[in-house]
Image (cartoon, rainbow, N blue to C red):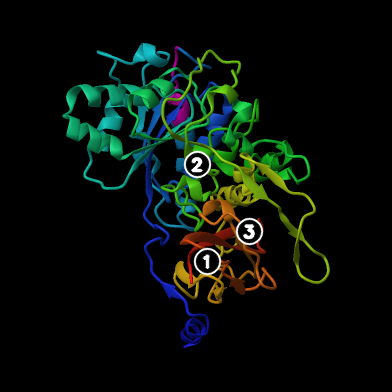
Amino acid sequence: MRMFILFILFGLTSNSIFGQNDQKNRVIILTDIEADPDDTQSLVRLLLYSNQIDIEGIIATTSCWMTSSIHPESIEKVINAYGEVQPNLLKHESGFPEAKALATLIKRGLPTYGMEGVGEGMDSEGSEWIIKSLEKEDNRPLWISTWGGVNTLAQALYKIDKTKSKEESARLISKLRVYTISDQDDSGIWIRNTFPDLFYIVSPGDDYGSATWTGINSYVKGIDNASISNSWIAQNIQQNHGPLGEVYPDVAWGVEGDTPAFLSLIQNGLNMAEHPEWGGWGGRYELSKPDFSNTKKGNSIVPIAPETRSIWTNSSDNYTPYIPNEFGRSVKKDSISFNNDKVTLWRWRDDFQNDFAARMDWGLMSFKEANHPPVPVLSHPDHLTVKSGSNFTLDAFETTDPDGDSFSFLWFNYPEAGSYKKLIPVNGAENVHVVYYTAPEVTKEETAHFILKVTDRGEPQLSRYKRVIVTITPK
């Protein structure tokens, strides 16, 4: 009855075509583990989400930093550590696979650099496994999360192109979704040029300083960077956190530089992997053809070349953080704003770091001792249609927390995620369960994204989200 009255008052219509997709994402990892400690760090985190992501393969590969060796034994070491805590993880959430099952997914790419390992006779256990996974009777896309070189995927694509019909090749390739941590061998640009329809997320070239993914470990002046500090890592991940903490290595170059390649596959109410332009824990990306004149050469052996087609790549957010307010309304906007591509990722950094820390606790603690994320519940569909200039309301009255913790609400418009690019301000307070907005005047149909962030007061504080997409129609 309560929502019926609200709908009558504000004249909302709705449908669910843009509803949050609750199915797990499939992923195969390509990792140059041992080229940098950050692959091991990222693997520790990935396994703690192995109940939310369907891991279908972890393939040891080369890269520009390790051109002639692969290290599947290092993958096995982390999986063995995971196996020691897996029974305790199941006390907190269901679905964590057994370590033995994960160990069967360890595969080998060729110990060969880049395009030297692509062509006739260059098949590997890893490239064959990618093809086998693609051929499964599974309608879900297959993500290739690439932490090093991508030549194992290149070989799979080469063989598909040479051995399958044109129609079958197109069908299989249409199921692929690729996210690479920049270009770490020379096969990335070959893939993009040779398979122009392939869904590909990358900050092209080897200039890491210009890449969105570095927002995970960039020190940002003007914000609290504690959650990526070595002391935070030691306290929350490494020390007194069991076998997985023991195998989590110190930072050598940058903490978890590979993690953005799978962050957006985690189900948290915000992420929608199929829509990189909507933004999420892994950053926000736009489909465009990068300007080659702005591409800088890094310090690796990877050549750079102009892109010949559009790819999912760097895109900027204009972001003003909310900060605690001691008196009166509990939050206020900061006096400093940011606008660049890395913002699209680091704006969520404290949230996903706290989430990681909580899952590390799950490996050792009982359910009662540990913290678990709140459960946001909308009082209406997550897609609404309103008339230009009309008032509408968003509500999450039924939100709960599994631990009985109290929690805070924060609603905000995310202009860059929708077609209407101007900020739509809240009418009143943004930190209550029900908020009121006025649809802007538009001359054509527009979409606007509104994010609900619910944060509990457990330790560590955990956040979950709901995304509401509002279609605004002209009068």
Q: Amino acid at mark 2?
A: Glu
Look at mark 3 in the image and give the residue it sits on. 423
- Tell me which residue sits at (37%, 11%) in the image: 116
Q: Which residues are magenta?
A: 68-75
**Which numbered circle lies on residue 375?**
1
- Residue 224, given in percent of the width and then of the height, sits at 75, 46
Look at mark 2 in the image and give the residue it sits on. 286
Q: In terms of image quadrants, where is residue 73?
A: top left
The answer to which of marks 2 and 1 sits earlier in the sequence is 2
- Crowd band around label 3 with a 10 angstrom C-alpha radius: few (<14), some (14–19), many (20+): some
Residue 108 in view of the camera: no
Closest to the observer: 426 or 404?
426
The answer to which of marks 2 and 3 sits earlier in the sequence is 2
Q: CA distance from mark 2 to mark 1?
A: 30 Å
Residue 136 in view of the camera: yes
Q: Amino acid at mark 3?
A: Leu
